[in-house]
Image (cartoon, rainbow, N blue to C red):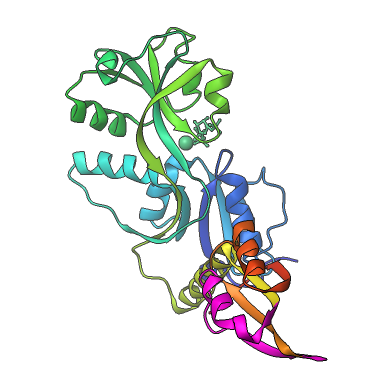
Amino acid sequence: MPPTTPPQDRLRLAIQKSGRLSTDSLGLLARCGIKVKAPKEKLLLHSENFPIDILFVRDDDIPQLVMDGVCDLGIVGTNVLEESALERRSAGNGHAYTVERELDFGGCRLALALPEERAYNGPQDLQGLRIATTYPQLTRRYFAAQGLQADIVYLSGSVEVAPRLGLADAICDLVATGSTLEANRLRAVETIFKSTAVLIRGDRPLNPVKTHALEILLRRTDGVQLAAEAKYIMLHAPKAALAEIKKLLPGSENPTLLPLAGDDSKVALHAVCQEAVFWETMESLKKAGASSILVLPIEKMML
Ligand code: PRP
Ligand code: ZN
């Protein structure tokens, strides 16, 4: 089905084409009930059931695309945002976007990594090294703060192979699971920045139709992120133990109490817990007199 909303009324969102954030960015849209069907090889995808188009690009290009108004929104790591902010600051420019939401994925760190066999006793061992990185500004800031010198070699990708090729002594790159470093026999020695994915929005005003679509998108994003941790809990509680049991429920307000057929001494308690419910909590509930304890996942939430 072709998109029915005219292009000027469709939001345009830039996401990473391939890399750590691609799958989770599409996953967030899916959790928001936004369908994008066509294959990912395309540069631009239209959602078939929401007025949004998705542009697939390199993550490093996302801040600029959003600031230039080519895209209304972007999903990008704070590492990329901070790098581009430092770059613009050094050129005397500010930024023209707002961070709308912190997202619950894309957690990683920017780390300095050395070949495994190289000894490391502290930052002083980095003095004078040639460092390959896609993040020259953040790397430079770290070295300046340490009072150390470095020779920075900018690479736009495949930074992890630089030491093996003799292009650099060390690298400064993102580490998520650590498998890229391991596969290249490198080891992280210093974390210089912690990153997470965020949803940004350009500062240019949106027309009323797009503004409305953005409101819905943000509300749904909040809903799926809230629901990710939250659980629905159901249990049977002796009336006498209710006060204690309520205190044990993590982050829940005003549980529902229902009579239990055939048992006047107990009630059924239903509650939404905003925080994770661990086995320990369930064991404490049991100890306090609760029985038939069920913990159910929540798919969506609107407060
Ligand atoms: C980063 C980084 C590594 C990888 C690390 O790439 O450059 O290649 O993630 O992840 P790991 O520790 O789980 O192996 P990114 O997604 O930013 O792609 P890009 O470097 O191509 O922009
Ligand atoms: Zn990147």
Question: Taking 174 as reference, is 126 left or right?
Answer: left
| Residue depicted at 40% across the width and 58% down the height | 69
20 up-or-down from 169: above or below:
below
The number of numbered badges drawn on the structure is 0
Residue 142 location in percent, x, y? 26, 30
Residue placed most toward the observer, 240 or 61: 240
Q: Is residue 106 above or below residue 233?
A: above
Residue 253 versus residue 284 in the image, above or below = below
Q: Is residue 154 visible?
A: no
* Residue 70 in view, yes or no: yes
x then y, percent, for residue 240: 61, 85
Q: Residue at x 46, y 22 (%)?
A: 159
Query: What residue is at 27 percent from the left and 39 percent from the top?
Result: 87
Q: Residue at x 41, y 71 (%)?
A: 206
Asked whether 127 or 151 is in front, the reply is: 127
Position in image of residue 279 (x %, y %): 64, 57
Farthest residue toward the right? 262
Q: Magenta residues, as a range?
A: 236-263
Residue 259 vs residue 134: left or right? right
Query: Which quadrant of the rendered structure holds the N terminus?
Result: bottom right
**Up-down relation of residue 174 to residue 251 (above or below):** above
**Magenta stretch encompasses residue 186:** no
Q: Return the residue nearer the eye: 247 or 159.
A: 247
